[in-house]
């Protein structure tokens, strides 16, 4: 019997469409409910609508506004315990070819 993590809903903040869509497909295929955003404003709107357990964001965006977004999400949603970056997550293909 497999032990399932407490993480069920994941928010991916990623400006690059190919990486964002690849992460969404992989995570959804693993059974997670995945929400996506291209920027901090979209991320906060998603967090207002959905309970988020795990935040995955692009490492290059982890500064200034992104840190403030994470802080605000943790205040709004105390169950947000984790943050991971997607800087090393690259799709194995390009959607353009």
Image (cartoon, rainbow, N blue to C red):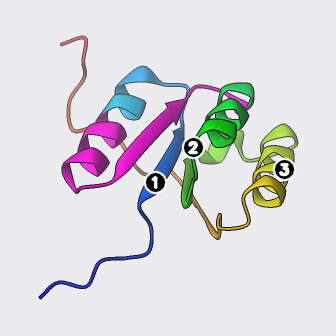
- Does label 1 or label 3 sit earlier along the sequence? 1
Q: Is residue 13 left or right of residue 10?
A: right
Residue beneath disc 3: 72
Residue occupying the point 27% across, 46% down: 28
Compare residues 10 and 64 and report the one nearer the observer: 10
Disc 1, SS: strand
Image quadrant of residue 14? top right
Q: Nearer the viewer, residue 48 or 82?
A: 48
- Residue 57 appears in the picture as rendered: yes
Q: Dot 3: what SS?
A: helix
Label 3 and label 2: CA atoms lie apart by 14 Å
Q: Which mark's residue is nearer the viewer, 1 or 2?
A: 2
Residue shown at the point (37%, 76%) measured from the top left: 5
Q: Is residue 87 something that shows in the picture?
A: no
**Distance between mark 1 and mark 2 Cα atoms:** 8 Å
Crowd around label 3: few <14 · some 14–19 · many ≥20 (10 Å): few
Estimate how packed mark 2 is, as few (under 14), some (14 to 19) or many (20 or more) residues with alpha carbons within 10 Å: some
Residue 8 percent coordinates (x, y)? 41, 61
Residue where numbered disc 2 is placed: 50
Is the C-beta separation of discs 1 and 3 under 8 Å? no
Tell me: residue 48, above or below residue 27: above
Residue 20 in the image, given as x and y percentages of width and height? 42, 32
Judge by depth and name the residue closer to the eye, 41 or 93. 41
Quarter of the rendering occupied by the N terminus:
bottom left
Bounds of the magenta segment: 22-40
Question: How far apart are the two marked residues, 1 and 3, measured between alpha carbons?
Answer: 17 Å
Q: Quadrant of residue 21?
A: top left
Q: Assess disc 1: are there few (<14), some (14-19) or many (≥20) residues with their C-alpha within 10 Å of its C-alpha.
A: some
**Disc sitting over residue 9 in the figure:** 1
Q: Is residue 60 part of the magenta span, yes or no?
A: no
**Rendered position, 22 above or below 3:** above
């Amino acid at each position: 019997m497999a032990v399932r993590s407490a993480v069920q809903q994941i928010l991916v903040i990623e400006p690059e469409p190919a990486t964002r869509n690849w992460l969404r497909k992989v995570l959804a295929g693993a059974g997670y409910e995945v929400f996506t955003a291209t920027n901090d404003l979209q991320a906060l709107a998603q967090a207002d609508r959905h309970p988020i357990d795990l935040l995955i964001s692009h490492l290059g965006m982890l500064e200034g506004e992104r840190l403030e977004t994470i802080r605000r999400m943790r205040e709004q949603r105390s169950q947000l315990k984790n943050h991971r970056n997607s800087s090393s997550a690259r799709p194995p293909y390009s959607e353009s070819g």
